[in-house]
Each structure stands twice: as structure tokens, then as C-alpha cells.
Amino acid sequence: MRQSAPRSGVRSLRFRPSGRRISGSGGGLGPYRALVPVHRDTLIAAQYFAAVAGTAAMRRCLTRPSSVLDRLEDVRRVTAHLDEFPNDLEIPVIEYETGEGYAAWAPRYDGPNPAVDASRSAIADMLRAAPSGSALDAACGTGSQAAQLVGLGFDVTGVDASEAMLDVARTNVPGATFHQGMLQSLPLADASVDVVTCSLALTHVPDLGPVLAEMARVLRPGGSVVLADIHPTTVSLGGAAVFPTGEEQFQLAFVRNLVHQVEEYVTAAVGAGLQVTECREPRYPEEAITGNPAYAVVPDAVRQAFDDLPFLLVWRLTKPA
Ligand SMILES: C[S@@+](CC[C@H](N)C(=O)[O-])C[C@H]1O[C@@H](n2cnc3c(N)ncnc32)[C@H](O)[C@@H]1O
């Protein structure tokens, strides 16, 4: 899953919209371009059902081997009827580069999303202990975290690489100020905010070090950085940022998530001069389990595969006063 990228390569840090130019606006950096996938393949639904049953079996081979027989039975049932619905569904699976993906996702981003809901609530919990004042929401997307900060009384600036996401944010949160910019070079002055939040974005960044250093730079002494992202365990199990495209044919369009283990966060935070004040690992919420596409076919397998696994990794980091 992990993409390799040169540590200092600015090229690897930029959003790289590619493809045919079309006149008009609404793209990532510059004019809108037709979407060009990084990779395109086909997933047969039966493959996914079997994969979930296998994940569940792996977790229980020693602790509950008798339940693994039920998972074998799931696989047998699915593979015995490979030519029947829904096992035979052929689903186009299309990977997009980060900038392309968010430009396409922007108009539909604000639909139901268990990760966004869980992240919002985890960040709200951690902000209770943070000082009020001015806040930066870094990689703010369509502004739902910025809206939460405005509601808590912060004076809010949002920054994101994607103009398409920012267009939606400006409409959603008129009480905040939004700027286009990268996590690796935030368009804010040194020591200018009391709080930095960043939700569901570090998983798209190859190297956490320069990003945490930027957050520490713009933070005032005594201030807090609150980070929430998809947990590395979930990303390691194939978790990606899947989004609706509005196409008639059902397809799985996604932006790849990168695995950042806990040690990478701690190393980046300590390297940036930040203290680790709090760390939490919220488990899979019920809606992420019942909302899994395999739940209608192999519900016990879905529950056994994901139950009690960490869904998010959430941090509060403090800049010494
Ligand atoms: C999953 S969305 C999260 C949006 C918002 N924080 C939320 O929780 O709903 C990820 C966002 O990160 C932005 N992003 C990804 N990499 C970035 C980078 N290197 N610099 C700035 N923004 C970035 C994308 O444009 C996108 O808006």
C-alpha cells in the first residue's frame, strides 16, 4: 500500500492534476482538467466477500477456531455461486491522484461519511482542553471542521490544496477565511494561531516531518495541534478514500491512503518540538460496520473482521510555552 516518495522532492508533495485541459474553473491547481486515473482495474464482488471472511478468520484462528469454520462456510457459499448476484458483480475500481480525486469529490463530499463524523467528534473532545482564540484548520476540505471551530468561538482560517474543496468551504462556512495552500508550506505567519486542527489529510502526505514542522511554526507557544486520521491498522487493511463520482454505472473511485505508523507521528512531533499530550484510538463505529458493502452478504464476517479495531488515530500535541 505504501507509496515511496523522495524525502525532499517538492514534485512529490504537489498535487499533480494531469490530463487534458478544459477551459473553465474548478480544478485542483489551475484550470479544470479531465480526470485521468492512476490505475484502473475490476473487482468481482465475490473477491471482496471472500477477503472479508478471510480477515475475520485470520483474527480468530487461535482464539475462536470453531467460528473460523463459519467463515470457511461463507467462502464456500460465495464461491459455489460465483455466477449469481451479487457475487458476480464486476465493479470498476479506479484510483485517482490526490488532487484529481478531491477536485472530482468536492461537489459530493458532504454526504454521510462515518470517518468525517468520528473525526469531528474526536477533535471536539480534544479541543475542550485547548485554549480558545485563533485557529487554523489545515487541509480543511469543504469546511466541516472549520464550522465546528467557528461554533466553539475560534477566529478560523482554513487552508487546503484543492480550490474545488475550498469553493464549497467558502459557501458552507461564511464566518471563516479560506486560502489555497499546501500542508508543507502553510500560508500563515510564524506563531500566528492558538490551535491547529488537521483531519483525515495526513494519510495523503508521504512524509509527516515537514508538515508537523509547519504546524509548529505557525502555532503560538502554549498552543495545541489536534490531528485525527484514519488509523494505520485500517489503512493497512486496504482502507482508502472511496468517493462517489455521480457516474451511472456503480464504480469504486478512490484516492490512496498512506500508512503512517504511530512511531512516524511521534518522531515527527518530537522533531518539530511538540509534546505529545494526548493520544486516542477510536474503534470502528457501528455505522462503518453495518455500512460495509459485504454486510448484506456475510454480516458475521464483517463484524468479526472489524469489531474493536482502531478506526482513527487522534493526537493532541502541545508547543511548550
Ligand atoms: C479527506 S479530505 C478531509 C477534509 C477535511 N479536513 C475533513 O475532515 O472533512 C482531505 C483533504 O486534504 C487535502 N489535502 C491533501 N493533501 C494536502 C496537502 N499536501 N496540502 C493541503 N491540502 C491537502 C485535500 O484537498 C482534501 O481537501
Image (cartoon, rainbow, N blue to C red):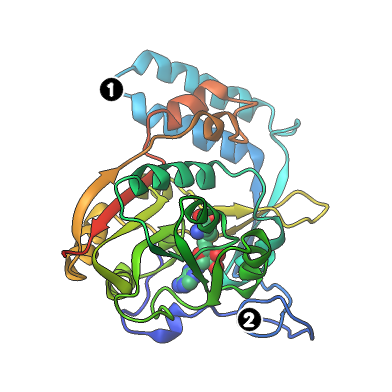
The tag on residue 72 is: none
Q: Position of residue 207 (x, y in %)?
A: 33, 70
Question: Quadrant of residue 109 in the image?
Answer: bottom right
**Label 2 sits on what residue type?**
Ser
Vertical side of 157 occupied by 78: above or below: above
Query: Can you tell which of label 2 and label 1 is closer to the viewer?
Result: 2
Question: Which residue lies at the image location 33% right of the left edge and 24% below the top edge?
Answer: 61
**Mark 2 nearby-residue class (10 Å; few <14, some 14–19, many ≥20):** some
Between marks 2 and 1, how big is the CA–CA gap?
Answer: 48 Å
What residue is shown with label 2?
18
**Label 1 sits on what residue type?**
Leu
The residue at the far right in this view is 248
Q: Position of residue 62 (x, y in %)?
A: 28, 22
Vertical side of 147 occupied by 280: above or below: above
- Say whether residue 37 is visible: no
Question: Which residue lies at the image location 65% right of the left edge and 59% below the top edge?
Answer: 172
- Say whether residue 126 is visible: yes
Q: Which secondary structure lies at badge 2?
A: loop
Q: Which secondary structure lies at badge 1?
A: loop
**Mark 1 nearby-residue class (10 Å; few <14, some 14–19, many ≥20):** few
Determine if the C-beta at disc 2 is less than 8 A from ligand 1: no
The tag on residue 62 is: 1
Query: Which of the image's four quarters has the C terminus?
Result: bottom left
Q: Is residue 213 left or right of residue 241?
A: left
Most foreground residue, 219 or 211 = 219
Most foreground residue, 90 or 33 = 33
Q: Position of residue 251 (x, y in %)?
A: 71, 52
Question: Quadrant of residue 136 in the image?
Answer: bottom left
Vertical side of 56 occupied by 300: above or below: above
Question: Quadrant of residue 1 in the image?
Answer: bottom left
Q: Earlier in the sequence, mark 2 or mark 1?
A: 2
